[in-house]
Amino acid sequence: MNGSEPLRVAVVGLRIHAGGLEPEGNHGLIKSFHGQEEARITAYCEWDAGEAAALESLARYDPEARIFDNLCEFFEWDGFDAAVVMLPPDEATRAAERLAEAGKHMFIEKQAARTAPELLPVCELAKENNLVVQIGYPWPRHPVAQEIRRCLDEGVLGKLLAMEARLVTIQVAPGLREPDHWMYRLETEGGGILHMEGGHWLTLFQMFAQARVRSVTALCSRRTDASKEGVEDAATVALEYENGVHACLHMGYLLSGIGPRNDTFMAVRGQLGAASWGPVGDGLLTVSSAAPSWAGAPERRFNMPPAPRAVYAEQWGFEYVTDFVRAVREGGKPVVSIEDGHHILQIFDAAYESSRTGRRIEI
């Protein structure tokens, strides 16, 4: 798509990271798209009764946009070029398939499906119709992630050897993370902590490794009492990449709610040095290197706090949305494509199979 007219965007679903247009609070992806100079929102569609008030608020703050509370009626209308899909995975896949059949570009907030086979028809339609589909994993735009990538590109860390990451967060329990919410049920989300949050970390691993995963070995368990049966709240996953890089990802809904809400860390280790980032999301990065160019100061600390912005994931999240809009308008590649999203789901599926069978699973 080219031309001077802005990209016409329809919002499909308001159930994950959507936010609203209220000036104070409720900062989400709607504000990210609403703030794009090269795009405008032409419609909002949400059929869940629990989101009726949110839909009414959007109608007040954006009176020029069309409002739909019925998906069938929405698909009878053609006043948009691209859609932002913010639905539970079990509904997101069905909506995405219909959008792809209609030739619409898509930004799909994670996850795009419960399993890799469920997403495959959407992948095939996107390829057949030459669609730009970007999955909502914005971490490659974080300034620390980009600095780690720069260190790898410039040889500061040498040959990449291994990576590790950790996210331990608040338990799924009444008063903390409500067990009946769709995010914590197998039939709607597709899995537990690994499925819900693991894609962000796997996207970073792929950004640094520049390769696909070859094999997966995992333990995925239900360790607390309140989590639904069949939905893991602890996962430890070992990954082997096609270029030989090893990675370990540890995740858990394990914290009691007393003290910090999150315990996060990431490390990237190469033959000449290492980079450590923690807490992940902040701007603190430590890099050590035996590269000759670093001889005068072999260990360095950086503080690169993300620029604030009242949207989902601050300025770097806004830039990730800008990447999508420009990819559609200029015919470019999305930062995290639907093929990347499909591969992440393959990793999830392999991890659950490995945990069930006790075997290492090849992808």
Image (spheres, helix red, strand yellow):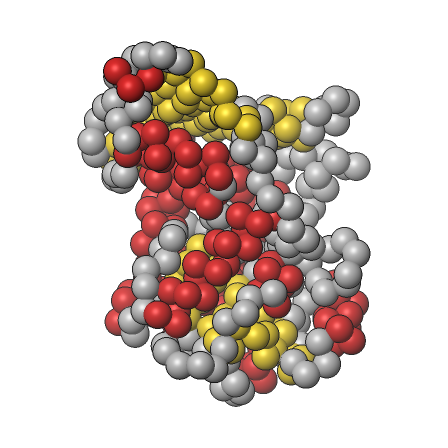
* Residue 120 vertical placement versus 226 (above, below): below
- At 26% from the left and 27% from the top, the residue drawn is 155
The foreground one among 334 and 128 is 334
Residue 15 visible in the shown view: no
The foreground one among 354 and 321 is 321
Query: Is 227 on the left-hand or right-hand side of 100?
Result: right
- The x and y percentages for residue 200 are 47, 41
Q: Quadrant of the C terminus?
A: top left
- The x and y percentages for residue 230 are 54, 37
- At 71% from the left and 76% from the top, the residue drawn is 62
- The x and y percentages for residue 39 are 52, 72
Query: Is 256 on the left-hand or right-hand side of 290?
Result: right
- The x and y percentages for residue 301 are 49, 20
Q: Quadrant of the N terminus?
A: bottom left
- At 34% from the left and 50% from the top, the residue drawn is 340
Query: Is 21 on the left-hand or right-hand side of 278?
Result: right
Q: How many marks?
A: 0
The foreground one among 251 and 57 is 57
- At 29% from the left and 19% from the top, the residue drawn is 293
Q: Examine the image and state in which quarter residue 178 appears.
A: top right
* Residue 98 vertical placement versus 342 (above, below): below
Residue 64 visible in the shown view: yes
